[in-house]
Image (cartoon, rainbow, N blue to C red):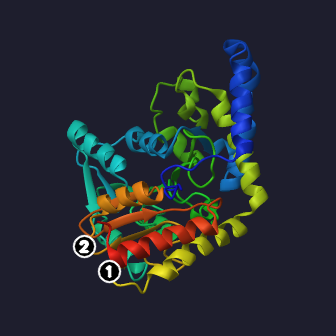
């Protein structure tokens, strides 16, 4: 049972079928069929993805994952020694490492704001950022959903805060995009990056990067692009030879998503989460590292059992119950991250809850 869909989700069979057919078609004559017939379909996918996000297609690039999207901005913005990029202790390690590399290489400064992993209110996520802004702050990086425990950030308020001070905002939407209903265009962020192989269930190795039109000329592409592409969103897709099938199959994933409906999908995810958390919340030794209030989290939840190291619990769940989860350990969190998806069955949820009940009451030895 895959309960780490927050890491990577399988694609529906219809998406796999499109991917397979297009790969087979490509291999009949790659330089002819792939480049002349399949690659142009990327524009249809761009249009549909932009509509799903809520932006102009000319502001939507198709990438391979959230890391590529976010690093395009973090490495592509012109920054000078002493310039500050503000981020938090709840952001993804690869993004932190990207900024640390720029610190070593160019002398910029990463300001990592500390905030509680399990806040009682959204003010605890806004106020530390506001206090950390200085005249040297050139960019704010914030997650819409923390990878650690599913905490939903008040992104719209943080974007507005940055804009009042003339600071652009980059949003890490890797764990957020289409997990729950959201008008992404209304967030008004300058940049947004996400993986599509999580909650959209598109092929593995697909992502998006939204850049406001006015910002496109300000951000260099990761790989070299022509000078006349300076203001073209497609410059971020200049990665050399790549399979057209992967990005084309995103369209089928969008069709599947629209067939489900975002409201029904979110309701299903919340139902599955509440089914297992309700069974465990009153058990001794069980501790939640996620605020279970609906405005703070949705499907992604982190939970621990006192006295059982998370790594050992992960191994026991897999070996004894065929349940795959991942462990999350920080100075505030000591648990496992649990992320079912819409295809997860009620029986699987109940089996997980029963396994956790055994671990909490009888141990795993």
Question: Residue 285: which numbered mark, if any?
Answer: 1
Of 238 and 24, nearer the camera is 24
The quadrant the N terminus occupies is bottom right
Residue 255 drawn above or below residue 359: above
- Near mark 1 (Cα within 10 A), the count class, few <14, some 14-19 or many ≥20, is some
How far apart marks 2 and 1 lie (CA) works out to: 8 Å
Residue 148 drawn above or below residue 174: below
Question: Residue 209: which numbered mark, if any?
Answer: none
Give the residue at x 65% y 59%. 343
Of 104 and 265, nearer the camera is 265
- Residue 275 in sight: yes
Give the residue at x 60% y 39%. 62
Q: Position of residue 58 (x, y in %)?
A: 66, 42
Farthest bottom residue? Answer: 282
Q: Which residue is mark 2?
A: 307
- Near mark 2 (Cα within 10 A), the count class, few <14, some 14-19 or many ≥20, is few
The answer to the question of whether label 2 and label 1 lie on touching residues, with beta carbons closer than 8 A, is: yes
């Amino acid at each position: 049972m895959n309960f780490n869909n927050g890491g990577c989700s399988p694609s529906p069979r219809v998406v796999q079928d499109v991917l397979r057919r297009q790969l087979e078609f490509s291999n009949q004559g790659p330089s002819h069929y792939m480049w002349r017939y399949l690659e142009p379909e990327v524009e249809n996918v761009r249009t549909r993805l932009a509509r799903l996000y809520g932006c102009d297609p000319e502001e939507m690039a198709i990438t391979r994952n959230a890391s590529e999207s976010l690093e395009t901005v973090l490495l592509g913005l012109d920054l000078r020694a002493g310039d500050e990029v503000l981020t938090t202790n709840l952001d993804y390690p690869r993004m932190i490492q990207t900024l640390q590399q720029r610190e070593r290489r160019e002398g910029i400064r990463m300001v990592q704001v500390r905030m509680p992993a399990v806040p009682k209110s959204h003010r605890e996520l806004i106020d530390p950022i506001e206090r950390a802004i200085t005249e040297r702050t050139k960019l704010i990086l914030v997650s819409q959903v923390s990878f650690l425990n599913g905490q939903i950030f008040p992104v719209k308020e943080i974007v507005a805060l940055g804009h009042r001070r003339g600071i652009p905002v980059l949003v890490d939407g890797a764990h957020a995009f289409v997990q729950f209903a959201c008008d992404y265009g209304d967030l008004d962020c300058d940049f947004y990056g996400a993986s599509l192989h999580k909650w959209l269930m598109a092929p593995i190795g697909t992502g998006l990067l939204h850049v406001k039109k006015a910002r496109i000329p300000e951000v260099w592409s990761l790989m070299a692009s022509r000078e006349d592409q300076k203001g073209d969103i497609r410059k971020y897709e200049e990665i050399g030879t790549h399979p057209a099938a992967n990005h084309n199959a995103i369209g089928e994933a969008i069709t599947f998503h629209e067939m489900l409906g975002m409201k029904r999908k979110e309701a299903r995810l919340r139902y599955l989460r509440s089914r297992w958390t309700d069974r465990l919340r009153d058990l001794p030794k069980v501790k939640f590292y996620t605020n279970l209030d609906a405005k703070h989290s949705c499907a992604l939840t982190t939970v621990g059992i006192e006295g059982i190291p998370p790594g050992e619990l992960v191994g026991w769940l897999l070996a004894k119950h065929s349940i795959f989860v991942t462990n999350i350990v920080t100075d505030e969190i000591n648990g496992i991250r649990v992320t079912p998806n819409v295809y997860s069955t009620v029986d699987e949820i109940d089996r997980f809850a029963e396994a956790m009940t055994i671990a909490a009451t009888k141990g795993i030895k």
